Image (cartoon, coloured by chain):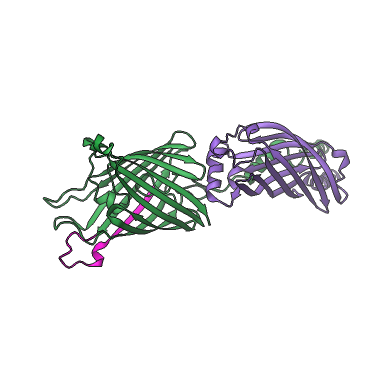
Chain colours: A green, B purple
Amino acid sequence: MKRPISLTLLLLTLLTPPALRAQEVDSLLDALTTPATEYASATFKATRIINGHSIEQMKARQLDFRIHHRFGELGDGAYNLWGLDQGTVFLGLEYGVTDWLMLGVGHSSYQKAYNGFTKFRLWRQSEGEENMPVAVSAYTGIDLQTVHWAQPTRENYFSSRLSYIFQLLIARKFSEELSLQISPSVVHRNLVATALDENDLPAIGFGGRYKLTSRISFNAEYFLVITPGREGAEKPINALSVGFDIETGGHVFQIMLTNSLPMTERGFIGETTGQWSDGGIHLGFNISRVFTL
Amino acid sequence: MKTAIYLTLLLFIVAAPMHGQDKYLCKNGHIWFYSETPLETIEAHNNEAASVLTPATGELVFQLLIKSFKFERALMEEHFNENYMESAKFPKSDFKGKLVNLTEIDFSKNGVYQAVVEGKLTIHNKTNTVRQKGTVEVKGNTILVKAKFDVVPGDYDIEIPSAVRDKIAKTVAVNVDMAYQPYKK
């Protein structure tokens, strides 16, 4: 009885495998190179889905120079070369102060408006030790129209030129191809066109992208204005846009069809006038060029 | 019986450290690459490469996470992951090989030794056999491995569109700098 036990022990000792076998080496290396938490990246190719902001922002010390351009209405027909004779431009400089804070200024020829904004990253979408199904950012903007007063004879205040925009951007990258975003928004306008118009305009933006190739994606975006509107007030038309993101090295080129001529939140949420059904569609593009400072 | 148990225990004690020193581990190896053209210099560093070296057999295994390569320009990093390496589909890259001139390296003696490594390098889910020269330095308990080699993106099915062809070098210089410590479980 004594012998077999010690023999077994001895055998066990001799048979103990070397500290690491090939599979163990693999699993050890696997464990070492697998991050505890994996964060979703590149949910969208650019900081805009089409008109509205996406969850993406410039990383630290990255400067984005943006040129947005919308032609006239397709429905204008041959006389205006289906809108190509006209152009509305937005120029923007947007900077990543840190990975979670982005600041931007811009100018749009639509109502000669200047705008400034901050975009804060609140949560990143992540999997693993830290689980967060969606990414959330907060966007706040201010918009200053400098176009000549519509009624120069009455007393006009500087504050009347201002509008404020608040948005929560909630996005999820469902797969490498599909990303969706919901953007609850409020536009506050200090001065509205008529007494019937409301100063606060709540809206919900819906946006998404589907990657067709690694460098091209199909994007769509819809802003639903949810204000009931006072009786007799002209209801804003919801902005619907579809387009493609085409990425070429340092540039992202976005080409789209949209019923909204304005390119900033105050405009495309509150002042969209085109109707898809009767040719009120604009061909347009955004160009993004990123510099590292 | 007692003596047998003691003997067995002794065997365990003697054998365990021998087995333990069998392998050397590097957890935070530095692997970086350069691509240099007149138009653009691209440089990225990965400080989280893991590797195991078995001096007795000369076996050398590396593994790294593609997303751990850090670029100076955030956009380059995004493109590297999204467009070139497709790191969501192929998150890791590895090398499995051997020191082929093992007889010329004395792991028990301090010194710098020329080494030749041969094995299978997998990048972007494509495997090629590679043979490279490097150095192995024995410094007490630490083993340092350094190597430099060229990778042709096309060999690993990494497509470079014509628009950026002038900005990315035909061959990318990859540098490996690892420091190994004895592995204890």
Counting every numbered tag in the picture gives: 0
- Asked if residue A237 lies left or right of residue B122, the reply is left
Using the image, determine if residue B105 lies above or below residue A115: above
Using residue B13 as the reference point, say whether residue B78 is left or right of it: left
In which image quadrant can residue A253 be found? top left
Image point 86% across, 43% down: which residue? B105
The answer to whether B156 is drawn above or below residue A206 in the figure is: above
| Nearer to the camera, A135 or A115 | A115
Which residue, as the protein is rendered here, is positioned at the far front? A79
> Which quarter of the figure is the N terminus of chain A placed in?
top right
Is residue B49 or residue A100 the one in the foreground?
A100
Report x, y in % for residue A34. 60, 45
Residue lying at 24% horizontally and 37% vertically, measured from the top left: A79
Asked if residue A160 is positioned above or below residue B68 in the image, the reply reads below
Can see residue B72? Answer: yes
On the question of residue A54 being in view, the answer is: no
Quadrant in which residue B91 is drawn: top right
Q: Which x, y percent locates residue A156?
A: 20, 66
Q: Give the camera-side residue of A61 and A71.
A: A71
The answer to whether A233 appears left or right of B99 in the picture is left
Q: Nearer the viewer, residue B12 or B25?
A: B25
Residue B19 as seen in the image, left or right of residue A158: right
- Give coordinates of residue A143: x percent, y percent: 31, 59
Q: Residue furthest left?
A: A232
Q: Which contiguous range is marked in magenta?
A: A148-170
Whether residue A166 appears in magenta in the rendering, the answer is yes
The x and y percentages for residue A185 are: 30, 53
Where residue A4 sits, quadrant-wise, is top right
Q: Is residue B67 magenta?
A: no
